[in-house]
Amino acid sequence: MDTQNPQTPAADGPIVQFRNVTKSYGALTVLDKLDLDIAQNEMVSIIGPSGSGKTTVLRVLMTLETINDGVIYLDGAPLTHMPKDDGLEVANEKYLRNHRSKIGMVFQQFNLFPHMTALENCVEAPINVLGMNRDEAESRAIDLLRMVGMEGKKDEHPSRLSGGQQQRVAIARALAMRPKIMLLDEVTSALDPEVIGEVLNVIRSLNNEHNLTMLMVTHQMGFAREISDRVCFFYDGKIAEQGTPDQLLGDPQNERTKQFLHAVLDAN
Amino acid sequence: MEWRWDFTFEILPRMLWATGNTLLAALIGYAIALVVGLVFLLLQQTRYRLINFLVREIVEFIRSTPLLVQLFFVYFVAPQFGIILSAWTSAMITIGLHFGTYLSEVYRGSLNAVPKGQWEACRALNMSATRTYFRVILPQAFPVALPGMGNYLIGIFKDTPMLATIGVAELMHTANALGAETYRYLEPYTMVGFIFLMISLPTAAGLRKLETAVARAQGQNK
Ligand SMILES: Nc1ncnc2c1ncn2[C@@H]1O[C@H](COP(=O)(O)OP(=O)(O)O)[C@@H](O)[C@H]1O
Ligand SMILES: [Mg+2]
């Protein structure tokens, strides 16, 4: 078993490695011995039917959930586990806090802090977690809010912003923690159609202008095709098929993938 | 029997002094209940299932028996087991425990009202548990708890006349005494009712203002 064998991946290897990762809820196996490598600066999209475990992949990587088996490595060190004697043991909270800061996450439901303004949302963790002083945190946050086109609304509370605006603030908030990896979970699914474009534009510019590794769950097939280096099709807690966007979306080999893509195209 | 203003003014000083005691009892009782409520809440979420269960049962028991019975138990029954407390101490303990159970439910409900996504956002931003509570969860739970907390402040205040039964010299007790001394009951009891009204109404209005102010400070359009 992998937990007995803590070979540490080379630092210039993949930034994320899932090794034999299993996650179950009771009798339900949601991730089934998953292996997944993500390279530095790679943009990976995850597609697949509802309930196939897409969100769970992001949640276990963000360490919002614990895994039942296997190990996740991050940037050359184990993430879900910590070294002990000659092996690994399940990471404690302190270890997690030291390691997960390299990861940022944007949620489907935004999850902005409703009692704080857009700017306060973006400086809270940099000040209190990274220990930045307020002036520096604010000037960086304002830069980020400008980048997502939200500088003019920096003093508004989330309740005064549209869904698309809230999601752009949420992206800025995650970026303010200087993550190396960004996890995006269906970030446009809760949005009205007319504001989806503004959020996709922000993600596009992130991908072009920043050294960020991104792992994105999406139902926007066109967008995934345009922006991804690789697309993974999830089925039943496994990667049923993966490849370049043109391969996977243009010329799928797996029956399940074909069925799924047909269903998605029919729905649109 | 007709209203006598000269008698009213004659007893006014004693009534006002008793009002002071009523307010003192309500405020000290409330302060204790606020803390007891927190303790009850925390003791139901420990790592030890047995403790959680026992505290849960105790809370349920206190909540479903009348305040007056509890008061008599602490003041009249406990001494027979060697626990002798003054009327004031008995009153404060009983009010603190009784309303503490209600407040622990208010706290619990308000914490549950904060969406799970808020905890997850904090975790994704790598915030510590303490920061998460004090910067994100409690500020959102507070406005939810505020109406309930306000109701129980007024509730305790309006229940203080029960303390007369064990001899705490609050408004009701003083009115009883005046009635017994002078055989006039109209003025003392009318004054008790009036004084309660004069304190309850503005307090309730003030609490509503506070709720609105808190909501506005947090950017809710209320
Ligand atoms: N906290 C949970 N408890 C029990 N089952 C869960 C929980 N979270 C997710 N699941 C189940 O795990 C499966 C995969 O969920 P998810 O990763 O959210 O799928 P997807 O994002 O691909 O739609 C689903 O069947 C879901 O019902
Ligand atoms: Mg999902």
Image (cartoon, rainbow, N blue to C red):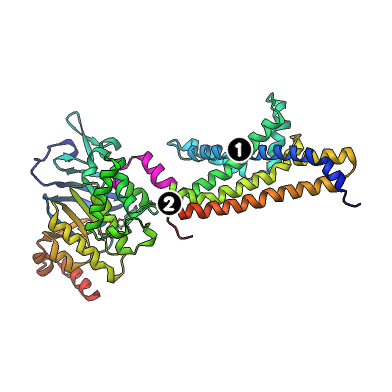
On the image, numbered disc 1 is attached to which residue?
B97
Span colored in magenta: B123-138
Q: Secondary structure at mark 1?
A: helix
| Three-letter code for the amino acid on which mark 2 is drawn | Val
| Quarter-of-image position of residue B30 | top right
* B128 magenta-colored: yes
**Chain identifier of the residue bearing label 1 in the image:** B
Read off the residue under disc 2.
Answer: B114
Chain name for mark 2: B
Q: Position of residue A88 (x, y in %)?
A: 20, 35
Q: Secondary structure at mark 2?
A: loop
Prevalent SS, magenta region: helix
- Disc 1 marks which amino acid? Leu
Q: Is residue B211 left or right of residue A57?
A: right
Position of residue B126 measured from the top left corner of the image (x, y, whole percent)? 29, 43
Q: How many marks?
A: 2
Callouts 1 and 2 in the same chain: yes
Say if B18 sits above or below B105 in the image. Answer: above
| In the displayed structure image, the side of residue A163 where residue B210 appears, left or right | right
Location of residue A192 with respect to A236 vertically, above or below: below
- The residue located at (42%, 36%) in the rendering is B47
| Chain-order first, disc 1 or disc 2 | 1
Q: CA distance from mark 1 to mark 2?
A: 26 Å
